[in-house]
Amino acid sequence: MLDLNTPVLVGVGQVTQKEVRLQHASSPVDLMERAARLAAKDAGLDLARLRDLDALIVVRSFREATQNSPAEVAQRLGADKAEQWLAPNGGNGPQYLVNRYAEEVSKGRSQMVLLTGAEAIDSARRMIKNGDKPDWHKPSQKDPKYLYSFKEMATPVETAHGIVNPSDVYALFENALRSHYGRSIDEHQQIVGELFAKFSDVAAQSEHAWFPVSRSAEEIVTASPSNRLVSWPYTKLMCAMNQDNQSAALLLTSVGYAKDHGIDESSWIFLHGCADCTEIWNISDRVNYFSSPAIRLMGERALDMAQISINDIDFFDLYSCFPSAVEIARDELGIGEHDSRPLTVTGGLPFHGGAGNNYVMNSIAAMVDRLRAEPGKFGMVTANGGFLGKHAAGIYSTVPTKSQWQRESPATYQALIDDMTRPSGVDHPSGIAHIETYSVTFNRDEQPERGIVIGRLGGLDDPLAPRFVANTPKDCDVLRAMTREEFIGRSGRVTNNAGLNVFSPEV
């Protein structure tokens, strides 16, 4: 017999607003309100029932368009009595919130929770281009409360050398993966293109996708006027797309509440397993750049809680901001490269699009729809925030959980990651060194701008050789060569000049 405090997802809503006249463009709060109302309708609840919400959490937009979005959403839904929180930046946020509030429900501390988030960047950009300015700000008597703190994504030294834009940083992972797999540049690009072509095929079948178009591997990886190089080896079609108008909302409650209010049991989705884990935070402190011990541990804990194996999962949505995020998660979860199971139910961030930090709320909603259509099957959603830094996972099914629902505190296993041995960092390196990984950034005219190098003093044979971050000289020929030849393992000399590290590779 199910415990009445067992958490269940009972309602989901998604909104994608395209081709709208600017005078009718929705603000992020408008989109969240619509998604929340759709979630209530999906649960079969009268909108008045939203006054029962005891927690309402908004995933922060990249640029908050109003002073207090949680309070404004609550006021519009008649849920003013709910605790109102803003979750800070981080793509792991939506799944983390499901995990955290499922625990609150299981312990009787919450009865019904609404999670939502949105972006309206496409409309805002079009307004600005049209000489207008979005007028979405609504004053509030108080500022929003953050549910947890935000940690800066890079150290000052990392930032000074270009560890800033996600596309540049994930390209560091991609190049490290290519070397780890032992592939040539052309071979790896073809395989990555084939991986993301499958994602675009899924997006082509989705009513919510921003770009519902199937694309070939060659189209995805080949630079062109409409698909410029962003940070080698990534083209625009290999990067997350957040310039859209999208929203999603989830309603989480207990079995007892769902029974008392007549919510159809066939629509209940159970969270069988969940876990949250954080990587060694700073990029220059990572164990390496082709793996993620935190994703591996997270997957193990979530599967253990669900009492199933990775082979029992029928559907996946692996976080897909860039190809390297998918490849590393796939490897760490134990999914074979040639596994026939699709790795997304949405089409992924480059093709479905993502409402900034809130993309995974869309992927959870899509997973709920998929599982309801095929009762008895299991789906796994993974989420990723920062530079492959913060991770969350959820395993879902229409099948009721087997035993009393209990979330293991992430603090009980986080130390396994924090205590891992890794190289020491050097802020002002000097001497002979070798490249551990690298990327090359490009401007909008497709000209190379900067080479970013993570290297080791001495050789790469010593796993604890001191590590540094540097830039290459601004030599266009060298930067172009770095995109045509394998530079991982290349030797050179690193020096410090006026606070910046410069690595001059042998060419």
Image (cartoon, rainbow, N blue to C red):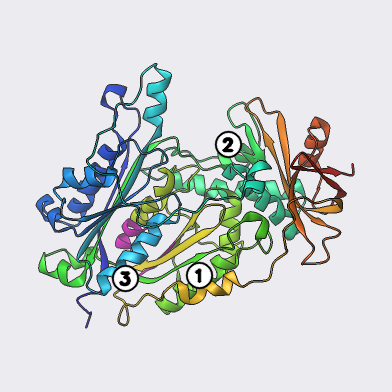
Q: Earlier in the sequence, mark 1 or mark 3?
A: 3
Mark 3 against mark 2, which lies toward the viewer?
A: 3
**Which residue does the numbered mark 1 point to in the structure image?**
299
Seen in the image, is 99 located left or right of residue 106? right
Seen in the image, is 15 located left or right of residue 473? left
Q: Which residues are magenta?
A: 367-381
- Residue at point 45%, 62% (across, down): 392
Q: Quadrant of residue 275?
A: bottom left
Q: Quadrant of the C terminus?
A: top right
Q: Quadrant of residue 21?
A: top left
The residue at the far front in this view is 498
Separation of disc 1 and disc 2 at Cα?
A: 30 Å
- The tag on residue 236 is 2
Whether residue 233 is visible to the viewer of this picture, yes or no, is: no
Where residue 18 appears, as percent x and y from the top left, is 35, 32
- What amino acid is labelled 2 in the image? Lys
Where residue 319 appears, as percent x and y from the top left, is 49, 54
**Which residue does the numbered mark 3 point to in the structure image?**
103
SS at mark 3 in the image? helix
- Residue at point 69%, 67% (across, down): 422
Q: Earlier in the sequence, mark 1 or mark 2?
A: 2
